[in-house]
Image (cartoon, helix red, strand yellow):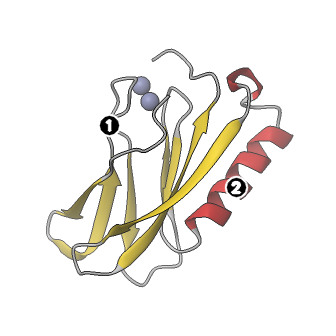
């Protein structure tokens, strides 16, 4: 399991205040999350293998809420729990944007 993930940051085409952060997932997917400058909304993608990442203000809190809600609904029991990591990426406009991700103990097959 990769503990330090490399995120690739891009501006969205034609939008100087919107970005995405993506990574090359071990399963073969390229999940990406979007964030708009000044927005209170976090973008996220939940990969088929179980990896989840959130981008935006309070990304870690949103991620933890999301996982807790899924757990309440009986989802994700097959992946054996999550480890949550917190980092930040630099937006195309220079701002440091929080990014949080969670990796399952037992990834699902792609
Ligand atoms: Zn994946
Ligand atoms: Zn996949």
**Relative height, residue 48 to residue 68 (above, below):** above
**Relative height, residue 96 to residue 24 (above, below):** below
Task: Check the image and name the residue furthest to the top.
Answer: 109
Return the residue nearer the eye: 48 or 80.
Answer: 80
Return the residue nearer the eye: 58 or 88.
Answer: 88
Residue at mark 1 to residue at mark 2: CA–CA distance: 22 Å
Residue name at image x 47 percent, y 61 percent: 87
**Relative height, residue 8 to residue 94 (above, below):** above
Q: Quadrant of ligand 1?
A: top left
Q: Earlier in the sequence, mark 1 or mark 2?
A: 1
Neighbour class for label 2 at 10 Å: few (<14), some, many (≥20)? some
Secondary structure at numbered mark 1: loop
Residue name at image x 73 percent, y 26 percent: 80
Residue name at image x 68 percent, y 38 percent: 82
Return the residue nearer the eye: 26 or 109.
Answer: 26
**Relative height, residue 1 to residue 43 (above, below):** above
Residue 89's quadrant in the figure?
bottom left
Residue 97 appears at what percent x and percent y?
41, 72
Secondary structure at numbered mark 2: helix
Counting labels gives 2
Task: Check the image and name the residue furthest to the front.
Answer: 3
Residue 62 appears at what percent x and percent y?
64, 62
Asked whether disc 1 touches disc 2, contact meaning CB atoms under 8 Å apart, the reply is no
Q: Which residue is mark 2?
A: 64
Residue 70's quadrant in the figure?
top right
Residue 108 appears at what percent x and percent y?
56, 19
Left/right of residue 83 with respect to residue 14 in the rendered view: right
Residue 91 appears at what percent x and percent y?
29, 72
Task: Check the image and name the residue furthest to the left.
Answer: 14
Q: Which residue is mark 1?
A: 30
- Does the closest atom of ligand 1 sit within 8 Å of the Cβ of label 1? no
Left/right of residue 72 with respect to residue 102 in the rendered view: right
């Amino acid at each position: 399991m990769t503990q330090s993930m490399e995120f690739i940051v891009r501006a969205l085409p034609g939008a100087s205040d919107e970005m995405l952060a993506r990574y090359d997932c071990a399963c073969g997917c390229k999940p990406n999350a979007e964030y708009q400058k000044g927005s209170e909304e976090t973008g996220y993608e939940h990969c088929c293998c179980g990896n989840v990442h959130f981008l935006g203000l309070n990304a870690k809190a949103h991620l933890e809420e999301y996982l807790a809600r899924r757990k309440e609904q009986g989802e994700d029991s097959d992946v054996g729990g999550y480890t949550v990591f917190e980092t930040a990426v630099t937006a195309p406009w220079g701002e440091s944007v929080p990014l949080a991700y969670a990796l399952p103990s037992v990834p699902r097959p792609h």
